[in-house]
Image (spheres, rainbow, N blue to C red):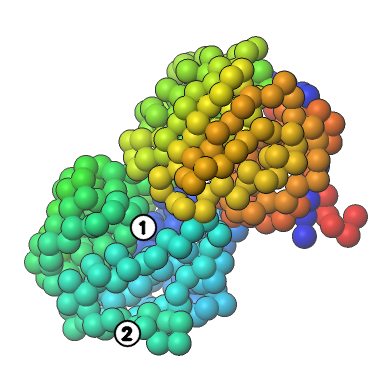
C-alpha cells in the first residue's frame, strides 16, 4: 500500500494537462453494453475505477482493450448477465450496468454496490425507474435481479436529483418501447456527455443538460467513437492547489465553461482565473479571503469540491461557513485537517472554519476519494512534512496527481509501504 509524502512550502508554477473525466467515462463504458460493434473512446483517464469498470465488462463477456488513454470496447457478444460482488464492491458506479443489461439482454443480476464511505447513496431511485419501465425487480442475497421482456417508456420524476440515476435510466430508455420522460433530471456536464455518446450510437434524446430529458426508444444501437470531456473536479483541485501555494499555473484542456460555480467562489477568495490561449491561467492570492459555500447539484457548487475548498478556507483570513447538502457524511476529512492545525467546528451539515496562519505537516489518513485530494493540497501548503496513507482512494479518481504536482514544482513523492 502506497503513501504520499509532501514537504510543503513550494509554489506551484508551470503548465499541466487536465485528464479525462472519471464521472463521464464510467457511464459511457456502461453504455457500450447497449451496442453491437467496436466502440472507441478517447481521453480515458488512467484510474483504478476505470480498471474496475473494465473488469466488470470483461466478466460480462465484453471485449475491452485500453492503451494510452484510448479504449476499444466491443459488446457484440455479451455472454454473462451477472456482475458479482467481488468486482462491484469497490465502486458504486458498477450499478450502471444493470439498466443496459436489462434493456438489451432482457435480464441482469448485479450485486448491490460499494464505494466511498460518504453516506448511504441508496439506489432506490434507480430501481423505481426500472420498475416504472416494466422491469420486475427482486433483491436476493445482496443482489439486484431484474427482468423484462422489453422495457417500456414511462414518465419518471425523481424525488431528489440523482446523477447516476439520471444516467442509468437514460441508458435503459434508449432501447425501451415508446417514450420515456425524466423529470427533475440531473444537469451535470457528465450527463450531457453521456447523452452525446448515446446519440452517436443512434439514440433519440432531447433535453440533456436541462431538468427534463425525453428519450424515444429505438430497436437497436450501434458502436460509436467519442472523446471524453476533461475532468472538472481535477481541474478545480489543481486550481485550489495553486491558491494554497500562491502559485501561477496554466491548465490545458480545462473545462472552463463547466466550472462557473467553482471559479466564481475561487475568484471571491482573491484568486485570478482567466482563459489564456487554449488553456486557463490560475494565479493564487497572497491573502486568501474567507468565502461561504453551499454544495448544490449542477450548476451549483459541486460536493466533490467541498473538501478541497475547506482546505483553502483553513488558511483564509477570517471565518467561513461550508454547508453540505448532498451527502450526510462528507465531513470525515475534518479530523485529519484538524491534526494539521486547521480550526474547524462541525454543526450538523455545516462546517465553521476559522482561518489560521499556517498548517503543520502531520501523518494523516485518507478516508475517501475527495478527502484524499484535500489532504494532498493541505500538504502542499503546510509547514514541514505531511505523510498521507491509504492513497488508493486518490488513485480511484485522480490520474497520477502526485506526478502532475511534482511537474509544477511540488516536493512530493509516492512511497511504497515496504520502503
Residue at point 64% right, 54% down? 367
- Asked if residue 9 is positioned above or below residue 350 in the image, the reply reads above
**Position of the C terminus by quadrant:** bottom right
Mark 2 closeness class: few <14, some 14–19, many ≥20 residues within 10 Å: few
What's the mark number on residue 103?
A: none
- Asked if residue 363 is positioned above or below residue 84 in the image, the reply reads above
Displayed quadrant of residue 155: bottom left
What's the mark number on residue 138?
A: 2
User: For the residues marked 1 and 2, what is the alpha-carbon distance in whole angstroms?
Assistant: 20 Å
How many labels were placed on the picture? Answer: 2
Q: Nearer the viewer, mark 1 or mark 2?
A: 2
Q: Position of residue 408 (x, y in %)?
A: 70, 27
Closer to the camera in the image, 28 or 3: 3
Residue 284 in sight here: no
Displayed quadrant of residue 282: top right
Q: Position of residue 113 (x, y in %)?
A: 47, 70
Residue 118 in sight here: yes
Q: Residue furthest right?
A: 419
- Identify the mark nearer the N-term, 1 or 2: 2
Closer to the camera in the image, 20 or 283: 283
Q: Circle 1 sits on which residue?
A: 164
Mark 1 closeness class: few <14, some 14–19, many ≥20 residues within 10 Å: many
Q: Position of residue 145 (x, y in %)?
A: 35, 83
Residue at point 46% right, 24% down? 265
**Position of the N terminus by quadrant:** bottom right
Residue at point 57% right, 77% down? 86
Q: Are marks 1 and 2 in contact (CB under 8 Å)?
A: no
- Provide the secondary structure element on which disc 2 rests: strand
Closer to the camera in the image, 224 or 24: 24
Q: Position of residue 215 (x, y in %)?
A: 16, 57
Q: Residue furthest bottom?
A: 141
Amino acid at each position: 500500500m502506497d503513501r504520499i509524502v509532501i514537504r510543503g512550502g513550494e509554489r506551484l508554477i508551470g503548465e499541466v494537462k487536465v485528464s479525462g473525466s472519471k464521472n463521464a467515462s464510467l457511464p459511457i463504458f456502461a453504455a457500450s453494453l447497449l451496442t453491437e460493434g467496436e466502440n472507441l473512446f478517447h481521453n480515458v483517464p488512467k484510474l483504478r475505477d476505470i480498471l474496475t469498470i473494465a473488469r466488470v465488462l470483461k466478466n460480462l463477456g465484453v471485449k475491452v482493450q485500453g492503451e494510452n488513454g484510448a479504449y476499444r470496447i466491443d459488446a457484440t457478444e455479451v455472454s454473462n448477465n451477472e456482475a458479482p460482488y467481488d468486482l462491484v464492491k469497490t465502486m458504486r458506479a458498477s450499478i450502471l450496468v444493470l439498466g443496459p443489461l436489462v434493456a438489451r439482454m432482457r435480464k441482469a443480476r448485479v450485486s448491490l454496490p460499494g464505494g466511498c464511505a460518504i453516506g448511504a447513496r441508496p439506489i432506490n431511485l434507480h430501481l423505481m425507474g426500472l420498475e416504472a419501465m416494466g422491469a420486475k425487480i427482486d433483491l436476493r442475497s445482496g443482489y439486484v435481479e431484474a427482468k423484462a421482456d422489453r422495457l417500456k417508456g414511462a414518465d419518471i420524476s425523481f424525488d431528489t436529483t440523482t446523477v447516476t440515476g439520471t444516467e442509468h435510466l437514460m441508458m435503459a430508455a434508449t432501447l425501451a418501447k415508446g417514450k420515456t420522460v425524466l423529470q427533475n433530471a440531473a444537469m451535470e456536464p457528465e450527463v450531457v456527455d453521456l447523452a452525446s455518446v448515446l446519440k452517436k450510437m443512434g439514440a433519440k434524446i432531447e433535453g440533456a443538460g436541462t431538468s427534463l430529458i425525453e428519450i424515444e426508444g429505438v430497436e437497436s444501437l450501434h458502436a460509436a467513437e467519442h472523446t471524453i470531456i476533461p475532468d472538472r473536479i481535477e481541474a478545480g483541485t489543481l486550481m485550489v492547489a495553486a491558491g494554497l501555494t500562491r502559485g501561477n499555473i496554466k491548465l490545458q484542456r480545462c473545462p472552463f465553461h463547466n466550472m462557473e460555480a467553482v471559479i466564481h467562489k475561487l475568484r471571491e477568495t482573491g484568486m485570478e482565473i482567466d482563459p489564456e490561449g487554449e488553456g486557463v491561467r490560475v494565479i493564487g492570492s497572497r491573502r486568501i479571503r474567507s468565502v461561504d459555500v453551499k454544495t448544490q447539484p449542477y450548476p451549483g457548487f459541486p460536493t466533490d469540491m467541498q473538501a478541497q475548498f475547506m482546505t483553502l478556507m483553513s488558511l483564509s483570513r477570517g471565518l467561513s461557513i461550508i454547508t453540505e447538502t448532498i451527502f450526510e457524511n462528507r465531513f470525515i476529512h475534518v479530523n485529519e485537517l484538524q491534526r494539521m492545525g486547521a480550526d474547524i467546528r462541525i454543526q450538523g451539515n455545516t462546517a465553521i472554519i476559522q482561518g489560521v496562519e499556517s498548517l503543520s505537516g502531520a501523518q494523516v489518513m485518507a478516508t475517501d476519494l475527495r478527502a484524499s485530494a484535500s489532504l494532498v493540497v493541505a500538504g502542499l501548503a503546510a509547514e514541514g512534512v505531511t505523510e498521507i496513507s491509504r492513497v488508493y482512494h486518490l488513485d480511484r479518481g485522480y490520474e497520477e496527481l502526485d506526478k502532475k504536482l511534482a511537474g509544477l514544482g511540488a516536493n512530493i513523492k509516492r512511497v511504497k509501504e515496504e520502503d
